[in-house]
Image (cartoon, helix red, strand yellow):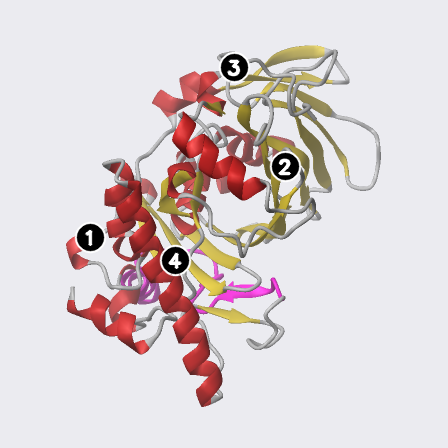
Amino acid sequence: MASDSDVKLGEEPDYEEKLDEAPKSILLGMMRQLKSGMDLSRVTLPTFILEPRSFLEKCSDFMAHGSMMLDLAKISDPHQRFLTVCKWYLVGWYNKPPGVKKPYNPILGEVFRCRWEHGDKGTTHYVAEQVSHHPPISAFHFVNRKAGWSLHAVIRPKSKFLGNSAASIMEGEGTLVLHELNEEYHITFPSYYVRGLLLGTMRMEMGGDIRISCQKTGLEMNGSFKNKGYFSGENNSIEAKIAPLGTKDTLYKITGRWDRVLNLEEKKTKQSKVFLDIDAEKSVSFTPLTLDSEATQQVYESRKVWQHVSKAIRTQNHDMAATQKTKLEDGQRAGKKEREEQGNDWVPRLFENLDGHTDHGSIKWLFKFQRNAPYQQGSVEEEAFDQEIRNLHQTHPGELAVGRELAAELASQ
């Protein structure tokens, strides 16, 4: 891991942030009031370090290169199938705004829906819901019925102040299911770090160990996101090994930069080749998402929820952004107080908790309407599922977990 001060300003501007004196003074003042190890989930951050989209929308980036997955179930060789999953997993991490930016913490009950249209290879749908506020827990479901797979995931970010840096540890797991083959790939996520909050260059990094495992293929990938150290290494790097489950008998080794080029070495033959060229994939496999216009979205859908905050950030009106953000956060606190007074628990609309919805620390959430049977071309059931997931806002409408006053104001907009 890089130290907080060994990266020079301007070395990699896409991952650095140079603040003007006024915002820098605000940030320094806030940081000096925090203690090392403090939980940042309850700390209100200044809007100039926010990315104008919700964390629920940010996680849709997992499928920006989902076209890599369209023929996954048709790959007969289990090693090549596993390598394709690894390639898809590694391709999308570059997708971020310049500088050091953090997405919004979703409001409890917030939902984000979108899709990627792939012509005769089907539609990939994405549904995400904020199922817990404290601790913050986000649940996701991706599915392409025609391609024969689904992916459900739960992430519980844990943010900590570490002195001159901050960390967001991405606890949780994703499970990719190939329905026809009855294969499950279990996936973990790297963590995010911001270095140089008080001294040095403010820089966004990814770090930590990752794992992809599949019991049926008998393979696992274990790797680490790495950054420049004092004397060696390179920023935005990955080192990973693919081996039979539970062994150290390396079959393949993946090395390189997740934002540039990754190489694959087959240990048996010692032959190495380009595994992933990020710039090339941007023009080959990237697919833009499609979503309903904000005018037709419901009040609990992400872009609608954060529309005024996002507009203010994009126009650099940070006073207005802070005002609108505070209104949402105060409304969420009012909603919690009203539920406690009435003795009511919050129950998510689209995901169910396998440990019982009152267990707020659980990360065992599943999409209520998932379909796991092998795809049946032209069947009534497939058409019904497609229509249901496209129209969740009509068949299973939700609401934001905010107080009555804000709820009435949002409904009138």
3 vs 4, front mark: 3
Quadrant for residue 209, please give it: top right
Secondary structure beneath dot 1 equals helix
Task: Tell me the number on the disc at residue 376.
Answer: 4
Q: CA distance from mark 3 to mark 2?
A: 45 Å
Q: CA distance from mark 1 to mark 2?
A: 42 Å
Image: 207 above or below 201: below
Q: CA distance from mark 3 to mark 4?
A: 55 Å
Lower position in the chain sequence, tag 3 or tag 4: 3
Residue range corresponding to the magenta coloring: 362-389
Secondary structure beneath dot 4 equals loop
Q: Residue sitting at 31 percent across and 63 percent down?
A: 300
Q: Amino acid at mark 1?
A: Glu
Q: Residue sitting at 38 percent across and 28 percent down?
A: 285
Residue neighbourhood size for the residue with mark 2, other residues' Cα within 10 Å, grouped as few (<14), some (14–19), many (≥20): some
Q: CA distance from mark 1 to mark 4?
A: 33 Å
Q: Which residue is mark 3?
A: 9
Q: Amino acid at mark 4?
A: Gln
Quadrant for residue 272, please give it: top right
Q: Which residue is mark 2?
A: 78
Q: Position of residue 367 (x, y in %)?
A: 47, 64
Lower position in the chain sequence, tag 3 or tag 2: 3
Quadrant for residue 391, please give it: bottom left
Whether residue 370 is in magenta: the answer is: yes
Whether residue 401 is in magenta: the answer is: no
Q: Which residue is mark 1?
A: 294
